[in-house]
Amino acid sequence: MRIKVDPEICQGHNRCCALAPELFDTDDYGAAYALNDGAVPEELAEKARLAVDNCPEFAISILDESGGDD
Amino acid sequence: MKKSPPVADWATDYDILDPDYAKDPLPVWRDLRARCPIAHSDRWGGSWMPTRYEDMQAFVKMVPALSSKEPIVVPPVKAFDPELDQHGTDAPPITSDPPEQIPIRRLILPFFTPKAVAEHRPFTEALCARLIDGFIDQGSCDAAVQYAQEIPSRVIGHMLGIDPARNDEFVGWVRNVLEFGLSDPEIRVKYRRVIRGFFADMVAERRANPGDDLISQLLAKKLGGEPVTDGMVIGMCNLLLVAGIDTTWSSIGAALWHFSCHPGDRRRLAGEPELFPSAIEEMLRFYSPVTMARVATEEIQAGNVTFKPGDRVLMNFPAANHDPEIFDRPDEVILDRERNRHIAFGVGIHRCAGSNLARMEMDVALRAWFARIPEFELADPDAVTWAGGQVRGPRNLPVRFKAG
């Protein structure tokens, strides 16, 4: 799985960073970005989906889903 | 607060300061969402009130057609006091629209990232421990007055480098602006001036003797290549004080209210502390305290209603967070709710800049309380009071527990 935070849409709620600190971090202004170029190890796929589903700005997307959607 | 006549029909005559509405707004929101869904009222200067999540998401993106210049829905202070017209109510960047809003907001954002607010966690932990020490032996306290209220004011005071002895004073100023002043413009004008004057003195003092506090750091920044003006920093301090205190106080208080009268949830959280993060998000969703306003700068067709230029629109984020289109069983508290895309901190370009600070304070406050007072209940349900208007939360919350 690969994920992406759209920097034009993210407003820095940081829900993703709280839910999946292994996958997201923030810049100096609190804007989120995906770590490791958005690569999501299989064991963190559910956490990535949680981050997507909790983002109030709908700023996170799953780019390629290898392993079924929910 | 002034008495106003009872509401005949909430769809056409809602009253955001109605005491029963402040206590429990859910029935009104359910009703309006089903039959309006955008209500109107002539009260308090007139406003529109959307209630659906989808509408709120759409309206925040209408910038600057829906401007943030006047985020308080009651008539602005300047209508009563021309002297305050220039800068008196400025609280940048919350009262700014793009394009200015973006660089102004970037001045304050670095102080509120998760890493930046984590630095204030030890101070907050020590503060909560000290507050609990102050009442635990009595077996009772007012959890709103003696606990929730004390936390955000002292944390923001610490960040701004304000003398802790003045804490009670500035809590009073903020309540006079946002709570008592809502229905009484004279009070609001008076305390707007007090806050402005206080920060004007403080900014002058920090300009002369810079320290390592937030005000001194803001004064050292540049905006558009020029040093930030004193006026801008005074406005920002106004924002940090006014927006940072009774909002978080309301959230901590509402959570303690919930757990004091829902023993099942209280026992569950006490026994499963790993639920704190999702429980805090659920408290934020269920008891979202803040409703900001926008003012229309052009005609906007919004479903079956039309906003005219100058019309004010209440961004009812709390109502949106109970929309059954988005949330499963929206009017139930579910401590382990996994999918919770709530907008308690607003959404869009004005997302609460202090949201990470608020979350840190809620986390510390609730964990500290539950660690030492896992069992507690309302001492006198009739003595609980709720503030309404644009910041909703308990203002008196007498609870009892086992002493010591």
Image (spheres, rainbow, N blue to C red):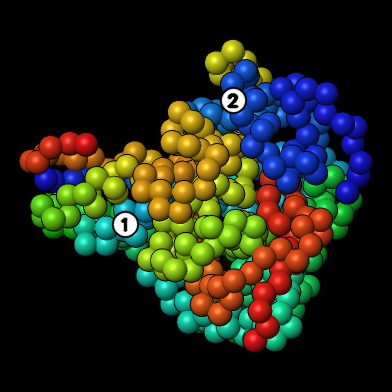
Callout 1: chain: A
User: Does residue B50 show up?
Assistant: no
Q: Amino acid at mark 1?
A: Leu
Q: Is residue B370 left or right of residue A55?
A: right
Q: Secondary structure at mark 1?
A: helix
Residue placed under numbered mark 1 in the picture: A19
Q: Is residue B268 left or right of residue A8?
A: right
**Closer-to-camera residue (B9/B64):** B9
Q: Counting other residues with Cα less than 10 Å from the Cα at mark 2, is it few (<14), some (14-19), or many (20 or more)?
A: many
Label 2's element? Answer: helix
Q: Name the residue that disc number 2 marks.
A: B33
In the figure, residue B137 lies in which quadrant?
A: bottom right
Residue type of the residue flagged with mark 2? Arg
Quarter containing the C terminus of chain B: bottom right
Measured from the top left, where is residue B227 in percent x and y? 51, 65
Does B91 appear above or below B157? Answer: above
Q: Can you name the residue that lies furthest to the top here?
A: B304
